[in-house]
Structures are given as structure tokens and as C-alpha cells.
Image (spheres, rainbow, N blue to C red):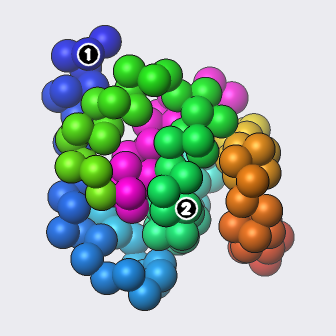
Amino acid sequence: MLARLSNRRTVDPGDYSNNNGPRNTPPHSSTQDTSSNNNALPAYVLDLVSCEIGIKWREFARKLCLREGDLNIIENNCRNNFKSCAYESLVLFQSRSINKQNMRRDLLQALGKARRKDLQDKVEEYFANMD
């Protein structure tokens, strides 16, 4: 398990040097937009959450049911860059999600449980406008 996580491509902390909020374009080429894959979270949502979750990224990742060991690896790989840590957590959550159709619901619930109702509302509004 540790070897599998260690071999994954990690986010370059330089990718998040702009603190002005989410970009309009996907931050990474590995992220698929919903237009090409209805089972993936939209790149905009990944970027929005990772830009705004801040220091609460660990609490949020725990609510996504990621293991503490995974969080330690992510934190080490991302050199304590909160945005990169949050993004990697979302990518891992997405890759491990068994029921892809419930991924949106699980993401929204995790934001609520992490006491980020403001961010939960933004993501929920984005999903509503997509449909």
C-alpha cells in the first residue's frame, strides 16, 4: 500500500503559487472534466475546494474516509502546502471511490462535516448549474 502511494505522481507545490482562488482551467492534465467522464469530479470543483479548504484539509480528508497514514504521505509529498495536500486528498478520494455515482454526495457531506458550509454551498451550486 505504501509503495503504491509513493509511486503516484504528486502535485508540484508550485502549481498553487497563486492564492487568488481557483483557476478557470484544470490545474493538472491528469484531471478529467465531467464533459469527458461523468464519473470524475469536475476540475473546477477540485481546484475550488483545494484552494479554499486551507488548514482544514486534514479534517476534510478524514471526512472523505482517507486513512491517517495516507494523509501523512500526502503531507510529506506536498511539503506542507495546504492546497496541494487538499488536491492530492481529493484525487485519492476520487480514485478510491467505489460508488462513483455517490461521489458528489460524499464530497458535499464531507465539506459539511468539516464545518465548511460556505464551501459546501459553492460546490452544491456549481453542481446544480451543471445539471
Tell me the SS state at disc 1. Answer: helix
Residue displayed at 26% across by 16% down: 2
Residue for badge 1: 2
Q: Quadrant of the N terminus?
A: top left
Where is residue 85 shown, x and y percent of the image?
Answer: 37, 49
Of the pair 41 and 92, the residue shown nearer to us: 92
Bounds of the magenta segment: 82-100
Q: Amino acid at mark 2?
A: Ile
Q: Which residue is labeled 2 in the image?
A: 53
Q: Residues within 10 Å of mark 1 (few under 14, many from 20)?
A: few
Above or below — where is 100 with respect to 87?
A: above
Q: Name the residue furthest top.
A: 1
Identify residue type, mark 1: Leu
- The residue positioned 39% from the left and 61% from the top of the image is 83
Q: Quadrant of residue 61?
A: top right
Give whichever of 15, 63 is nearer the camera.
63
Q: Residue 74: which quarter of the image?
A: top left
